[in-house]
Amino acid sequence: MNRADVESPDLVVRCQAGDVDAFAELYARHSARIFSLAARMAGSPETGEDLLQEIFLQAYRKIGGFKGDAAVGTWLYRLALNHCLDFVRSRQAKMDKATDAIDGEDRSEVAARRESPVERLDLERAIRQLPEGCREVFVLHDVEGYEHKEIAAMLGIAEGTSKSQVFKARMKLRALLI
Amino acid sequence: MTTPHPDGVTLSDYVAGDASLEPAARADLAAHVASCRDCQAMVDSLREISAAARRLPPLTPRREAWNRIERALRADGADSKSRVRRRPLWPWLAAAAAVLLTTLVGFKVVDLRRQSAQATSAAGPDIATAQSVEAELAQAEQHYQKAIAGLEQIANAEKGTLDPQTASTLEKNLTVIDRAISESRAALRAQPSSEPAQASLLENFKSKIALLQETIALINEMRRGSDTGAAGAVTGLKQKGT
């Protein structure tokens, strides 16, 4: 169990009382995970920071309703995920168009083997270059660890679409990283 | 006879250990991959990408991200508590600002230009006079700094009342003025008797005081719920930094 999972009840109570300093502590514990999700889903650290601000402002307004059924970090992450999904859905039409671009890629084009491991920074950059649509699904599946059926439910798409989007994203990353 | 290449999505599922693949289908895939260099290469690279994605460490937002959020939270908190909290603070803010303004108006700024001119019109450079001018400048600076500190205290205590965009404009403008103050100081260190540097330093102090006064005026207007007054004050704030 990491540090972020261990929240003192006092911290939650102080947050519920509108104590901004307590929120600063909550932010210090959870901002990296939430920012990672937001920045990767959005494909831009700048948009990720905008989403991060919106998420914490929303949390500040909603934490009064937090009942303690789960850890506050889990509650915060769900809030963040929903906010990111709303963001993704709001540009759904654009996303569908953008992902068409890689539909025709031929798997045989990239048969060469790589010996070197994928560099972390290269991968971060490459994820940002993924077209909207497959990037979000890839982040949810390969980075955040959600199952295809969960992603399908979250994004309102077919499970098969989630699978093909992850495949497209992996192929695109493979092409970008090799 | 070799089996046909499986499609990419199937190989991708195979890499991910997708539970929807039947054991028999999985075994067939494994056999094909083991005997096909292309598919083996594909599986290896897909697996590598997937594993690297799982290992990605968390990203850290910039430090400024929290500053923005904190301002928004404080503004939001102040907004929701306005009916119980805002009104009683207004007389204190107004009184504090008024005291500072009186202090500034009452303080007779030394006419450094005149003194300096008198010094240079004498028989030659007078070290004692130069030292006197520097002392007067130091005294003037001390008074300005005291006034600035007081105004900053008031402005910072209630800055959360401002919307993030205005607060950001204010910070930007203050940064510009602070930089100008630093540059004037540096010029004065190089040439302590430079009249333009002396005048510039004092002008920059005045600009900072004016900006802080307008910030407090804006905070007060917002507390009173005067959109017109607040709009005027915002315009003033924006103009100060340009």
Image (cartoon, coloured by chain):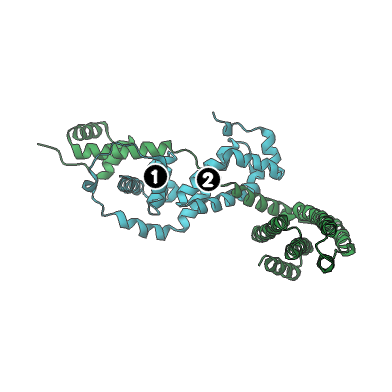
Chain colours: A cyan, B green
Residue A144 at x, y = what percent?
45, 40
The residue under label 2 is which amino acid type?
Phe
Please state the horizontal and vertical placement of residue B129, each as a whole percent of the image: 85, 60
Residue at horizontal 46 percent and vertical 49 percent from the top: A41
The vertical placement of B187 against A36, above or below, is below
Specify the amino acid type for callout 1.
Asp
Q: Residue furthest right?
A: B106
Residue drawn at x 31%, y 40% is B46
Q: Position of residue A105 (x, y in %)?
A: 26, 52
Residue B197 on image: x %, y % = 73, 62
Q: Out of A82 and B156, give the one closest to the viewer.
A: B156
Q: Nearer the viewer, residue A162 or B115?
A: B115
| Frontmost residue, B138 versus B31 | B138
Sequence-first disc among 1 and 2: 2
Which residue was labeled with disc 1?
Answer: A122
Q: Please check whether the numbered discs 1 and 2 fall on a single chain.
A: yes
How far apart are the two marked residues, 1 and 2, measured between alpha carbons? 19 Å
Q: Secondary structure at mark 1?
A: helix
Q: Chain of mark 2?
A: A
One can see residue B240 in this view: yes
Q: Quadrant of residue B45?
A: top left
Find residue B12 and report its image quarter: top left
* Residue B91 image label: none
Q: Which chain is disc 1 placed on? A: A
Please identify the residue farthest to the front as the structure is shown: B123
Q: Which residue is mark 2?
A: A35
Q: Quadrant of the C terminus of chain B?
A: bottom right
